[in-house]
Image: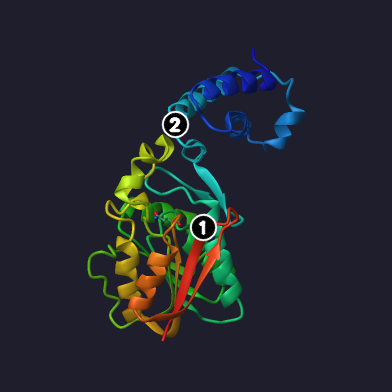
Amino acid sequence: MLTVLEAIKLSTEYLEKKGIESARTNAELLLAHILNCSRLDLYLKFDQPLKQNETDQYREYIARRGKYEPLQYITGTVDFFGLRLNVDSSVLIPRPETELLVEIIIEQYKEIPNTKILDIGTGSGNIAIALAKYLENSSVVSIDVNDSALDTAKQNAGLNDVHNVEFIQKDILNNVDFRGIVFDLIVSNPPYVSSEEYEQLQKEITEYEPRNAVTDSEDGLKFYKKISGFASKNLTSGGKLFFEIGIGQSQAVADILRENGFTEIQIQKDYQLIDRIIYGIKQ
Ligand code: GLN
């Protein structure tokens, strides 16, 4: 029988050989998931022998991770802005940078009641659900092209006891019409990787995450153009449009916002000092 520590060491070596980054952390998090404890709690259990079913399960998880399946799809969960969300291969895994987008919006809207929000390309529902939870009086509409993503997002709203979000299947590239409803705030973390850059991404992304959530299969700017045009017609005057952006896109997206009549454009850097969030006001 392997002990917790022996199992972690063997798995770390295996994952390192496969070229997995942060192999030890991955090995620990997968075992913590199986033992239903936190990663730190593992340190108190180093000498505990694993049961046969735990070893079998661990072996399966480590084999999957060794084939580059992302940790979050194996455990099926991710923590985002203090919320626990379910994820599966129909949705992009929420990234920590996106928490910054949510934080900036909450900071600006926390004193404003009844904000009507639209989240475009909701995926797991992370942005919509976090905004709905922390801006209690807001009402959020979330759209996504993919029905299975919407199922996951709805489940996540339920798990977090959030009821002020409505999920609707719509393709933003395809003439979305809200029949006269105007929003106070539109937000999106669209697929912004160009087809060229996509080829260079890690296997974890290209082999497992939904391609159409990551790349626009063009120059990376297609959704910014489409959504800015849409937002210029579907925001109230004084309403704001917020985007997450990729490395090197801030000036191009600022131009797109200006061309669509947005002013007072602001750009914020993430913790790695990369321009990551951009927003502007509709006049
Ligand atoms: N809104 C989700 C996120 O921010 C999904 C984004 C996407 O699929 N491009 O993670």
Viewer-proximal residue, 241 or 147? 241
State the residue at coordinates (46%, 47%).
93
From the viewer's perspective, is 202 left or right of 24?
A: left
Q: What amino acid does circle 1 point to? A: Thr
Q: Furthest residue to the right?
A: 44
The numbered disc on residue 271 is: none
2 or 1: tag closer to the N-terminus: 2
Q: Say which residue label 1 marks.
A: 98
State the residue at coordinates (42%, 43%).
88
Is the N terminus in the top left, top right, bottom left or bottom right quadrant?
A: top right
Is the C terminus in the top left, top right, bottom left or bottom right quadrant?
A: bottom left
For the residue carrying disc 1, how many other residues have a C-alpha within 10 Å: few (<14), some (14-19), or many (20+)? Answer: many
Q: Say which residue label 2 marks.
A: 68
From the viewer's perspective, is 238 left or right of 269?
A: left
The quarter of the image that holds ligand 1 is: bottom left
Mark 1 and ligand 1: say if the CB distance to the nearest ligand atom is below 8 Å. yes
User: Visible in this render: residue 160?
Assistant: no
Viewer-proximal residue, 99 or 142? 99
Give the answer, above or below, for where 33 lies relative to 110: above
State the residue at coordinates (49%, 79%).
115
For the residue carrying disc 2, how many other residues have a C-alpha within 10 Å: few (<14), some (14-19), or many (20+)? Answer: many
Q: What amino acid does circle 2 point to? A: Tyr
